[in-house]
Image: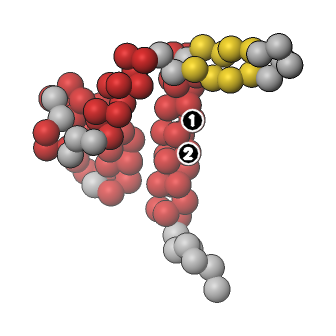
Amino acid sequence: MNKYPQSELFEKLADIEHQRWADWQKYMHSKCAIVENEDGEKTIVIPQNLFEQWERQIATVYLELSEKEKDSDRDQVMRYWKLIYPDEV
């Protein structure tokens, strides 16, 4: 038995989720530095200011975010809103 719905809509939403994740990773990678040690091992370093910002956002419920931060989440919902309510977009 498959644990996921066998639905075209479900697969479209999963595709959008992958795109959202990939965009976030591209953004993260563009903001981080890569540091290499003497052994050639690479480590990704997040700038302190971004780490602090993201930690604050993680600990903040949606209703307490700034309007700019809420807009970022709203932009992500717009990626799939038309699949749920096609007449509203």
Residue furthest to the bottom in view is 1
Amino acid residing under circle 1: Ala
Decide if residue 35 is in sight here. yes
Measuring from the top left, give residue 80's x and y in whole percent.
38, 48
Crowd band around label 2 with a 10 angstrom C-alpha radius: few (<14), some (14–19), many (20+): few
Q: For this view, does 48 lie left or right of residue 72?
A: right
Quarter of the image holding residue 76?
A: top left
Q: In this view, does 12 lie to the left or right of 35?
A: left
10 up-or-down from 58: above or below: below
Q: Is residue 78 visible?
A: no
Q: Distance between the residues labelled 1 and 2?
A: 6 Å
Query: Does dot 2 land on a helix, a strand or a loop?
Result: helix
Display coloring: secondary structure
The single residue placed furthest to the right in the displayed view is 39
- Percent across and percent down for residue 52 are 35, 25
> Are discs 1 and 2 less than 8 Å apart at CB?
yes
In the rendered view of the protein, which quadrant contains the C terminus?
A: top left
Quadrant in which the N terminus appears: bottom right
State the mark number for residue 22: 1
Residue 7 tag number: none
The mark found on residue 18 in the picture is 2
Q: In this view, does 49 lie to the left or right of 6?
A: left
> Residue 33's x, y, as percent?
60, 14
Q: Say if 21 sits above or below 47 in the image.
A: below
Front in this rendered view, residue 78 or 47: 47
Rendered residue at 55%/59% (across/down): 11
